[in-house]
Image (tube, rainbow, N blue to C red):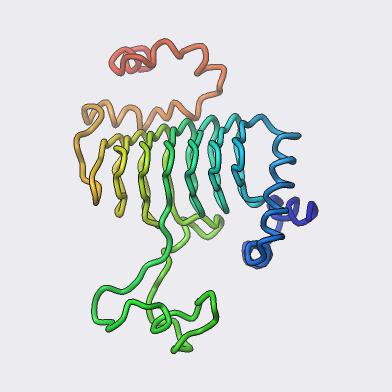
Amino acid sequence: MLLVILFLRGKNYTLGLKNKIKQFVLSNVILQNISFALFRIYLKMTTEHVIGYKAKIGPSCFLEGKNSFGESTTFIGSYIGFASYIAKNSSLQDVKIGKYCSIGPNVNTIHGNHPTNTFVSTHPSFFSTDMPTGFSYTTNQLFKEKPNKLNDKEPYTTKIGNDVWIGASVNIIEGVKIGDGCIIASGALINKDIAPYSIVGGVPAKLIRKRFKDEEIEFLRNFKWWQRPEKWIEQNASMFTDIKKFIKLNQ
């Protein structure tokens, strides 16, 4: 099992082969729990992270460093950037998270889509060949249930940018892209892409306001402070309290 974990973390293998092994492990509860336990030990031995009680991190996940996972959080088939954290009881799958993100408790990604027009029934047996039980009335996939991957080289379908704050109990529909610097109000349903530095809330989420003026947003999008070395961020942290001061000192 340890060899399987190391294999899934390797970069010199095709996504197809990795996905087949991942699906095999995930289809067996015993193998699944063993893989979570071994990967937890691996992370604690080799990297600098905080992993809460009963938190489950899948062996194919990539953690950039100084990440934190709250109690009973599940993180599968995903990527998390430097210093980003996820609070307790959240469940995220097939998502790429940027750096310095703050994700609250009970945040979930929602997977799978069902037809709402023309089809008489919304039950997958009428349009899907990917039924968990193998039971289906069709031999052809008649409806697109899952979004495309973000790109051909990565398995992720949902993207959360850098410096994003997501409040408690937010649900994110698979396939959306949340831009850099966004704030998502507690309880929101994210069912479409969110522009950078937007504050949104509601079910479904709607724009409340922009965080900064357009020219300030444009500066931050080009500056990308999260790509600076950690030493630079540490030395310049005092100017992060004022957007105008930040821009003036970095022009």
Which residue occupies the foreground of this view, 46 or 56? 56
43 left or right of 183 in image: right
73 left or right of 42 in image: left
Which residue occupies the foreground of this view, 246 or 35? 35
Image quarter hosting the N terminus: bottom right
Residue 42: x %, y % from top left: 74, 41
Residue 131 visible in the snapshot: yes
Q: Is residue 147 above or below residue 92?
A: below
Q: How many marks?
A: 0
- The structure residue drawn at horizontal position 29% and vertical position 45%, both measured from the top left corner, is 188
Q: Is residue 163 above or below residue 8?
A: above
- The structure residue drawn at horizontal position 55% and vertical position 37%, both measured from the top left corner, is 69
Q: Is residue 38 above or below residue 234?
A: below
The quarter of the displayed image where residue 141 is located: bottom left
Residue 37: x %, y % from top left: 71, 47
The quarter of the displayed image where residue 231 is located: top right
30 left or right of 113 in image: right
Image quarter hosting the C terminus: top left
- The structure residue drawn at horizontal position 66% and vertical position 29%, both measured from the top left corner, is 48
Residue 17 visible in the snapshot: no
Q: Is residue 137 above or below residue 107?
A: below
124 left or right of 244 in image: right
Residue 191: x %, y % from top left: 30, 54
Residue 35: x %, y % from top left: 71, 53
